[in-house]
Image (cartoon, rainbow, N blue to C red):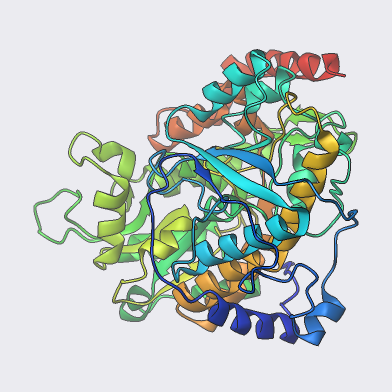
Amino acid sequence: MIKTVKKYTAFLLLFLAVCVIIFAGCGSKDNNKMNENKPVETDNPGAADSSGDDMPAEIQQNRILPDLPEMDFNRYNFRILSRGPNYNQHWFARDIYAEEETGDTINDAVYQRNRNIENRYNINIVNIPENGDLAAKASKAIKAGDDMFDIMSHGLQQIATLMTSGGLYDLHTVPYIDLSKPWWDQKAKDQLTIGGKLFATTSDYIILDKDATWILMFNKKFIKNYGLDDPYKMVKDGTWTMDKMYEMMSAASADLNGDGKMDENDQWGLVSQYYNALAFYNGAGECISKVNSEGQPEITLYSRRAVDVCEKIGMLQSDKNVTLNADAYTAKVADVWDGLQLVVFNTDRGLFYYAGMNRVTLLRNMETDFGIIPPPKFNKEQDGYYVAIHPGCTGSVAIPVTVDNTERAGIIIEALTAESKYTLLPAYYDISLKTKFARDDESSEMLDIIFANRIYDVGQLFGWGNGEGFFHQLSQNKNTLASYWEKTAPKMQAALEKTMNAFDSLN
């Protein structure tokens, strides 16, 4: 049964229209250095009214407010360690800081959100962009007892060692952070709380977790020209399965130059990468590890169903006549992501493209219309659709134990996160995806399904037994689940127990 999130109500759409006008502007600056705001003049007529009195009456009536005290932090510099613009061209933190309004929807929403909270609590939001090894920098500062930053935003996978080494606060214990509120990702809270502790999570404050949501895009021209079934209808009917996807992929693949081999110059049923075998696995509702009802992680990689799922994934991912895996071309193409994957799909040589949501924005100039759908079910009997989040690409919210005033940190983080629900999230979800980049109403409906059914795989996050590596092998037809499990199960269990012992030792 398809789960969906509730649509934004009319009052929020009205608010978005107001935001578009407010956000108009121009200019840009280099953000490679630490950005520190000048003191905020609270009587600035251009600054947002933190009371919300200037908002439409419907928004004032329906907006959920955080349960926070009125405070004056005397222009405290609230410092955020984040991925800098040169960390990765597509996975840097554009959700943390904006120097000024530029006319870009996301940038201006971040700017407006930050100014609102700066004015409300009399603080300066300071970005510390790191273009190198952010996790190593944070770890070094924490071990040295250096109060360098108040929060950090980095990939869950990269900061896993900080979670087990006692470098981060359990967010459940931070005053004024209310993880039950709708601006915190409830799926992340439930799936990442281990032994009652949650050291990092995602929320409306972050959009990298949305960018790191793995989706399928499909070329509409191919659907029409090859007389293929409508993917939208299959998703809604519950008949969108791995078998159906492979049938369509096979019909669309072609040796365009007739040289008797399939390569980067030909036409493909699926544009993919080795990691996507794990994304397909999550899409079948399976995980390397899941947190059980008692809050303890369990290795769930192996079962009869999981073996069958992996066989189907091998069919989708390792057939070199229908699937182009970008990783196989690293010796021929300098940038296999933008220089191969994107080019093949953008030039009408790929039926399906499986990648992070951030790729949607890179296809804004594609002439042929494309659609967005979740990955297929394993079979029709599967209870719904599931969508993988890459824990390395996503951003997160985490507080180092070097912060001595957790009340102040909790108040500011909760305020920023709650404010993001009404500024950054609508800008990303409704304007950037549903309006600006999505090509049709059906894609908007699919986005609701996608964001309501995401999976955080803690086995991938902590890397127990290198489960992710197995799926890379599966994509190359170099291993089977049964063989991998026989050799690796004891190591995976031992690694999990080591992590849990570390968690249990933390106060």
The answer to whether residue 342 is left or right of residue 130 is left
Task: Give the percent coordinates (x, y) of residue 179.
Answer: 84, 48
The answer to whether residue 387 is left or right of residue 404 is left
Q: Quick check: 446 above or below 71?
A: below
User: Can residue 385 be spotted in the picture?
Assistant: no
Closest to the observer, 236 or 446: 446
* Residue drawn at x 50%, y 62% as measured from the top left: 107
Image quadrant holding the N terminus, namely bottom right
Task: Give the percent coordinates (x, y) of residue 87.
Answer: 42, 38
Closest to the observer, 473 or 211: 211
* Residue drawn at x 44%, y 64% as measured from the top left: 217
Closest to the observer, 380 or 126: 126
Image quadrant holding the C terminus, namely top right
Closest to the observer, 125 or 246: 125
* Residue drawn at x 69%, y 67% as measured from the top left: 43
Report the number of numbered marks.
0
Name which quarter of the figure residue 326 lies in.
Answer: top left
User: Can residue 45 be spotted in the picture?
Assistant: yes
Name which quarter of the figure residue 490 lies in.
Answer: top right
The answer to whether residue 236 is left or right of residue 242 is right
Q: Quick check: 42 above or below 293?
A: below
Task: Give the percent coordinates (x, y) of residue 53.
Answer: 79, 78
The answer to whether residue 413 is left or right of residue 475 is right
Task: Give the percent coordinates (x, y) of residue 359.
Answer: 42, 58
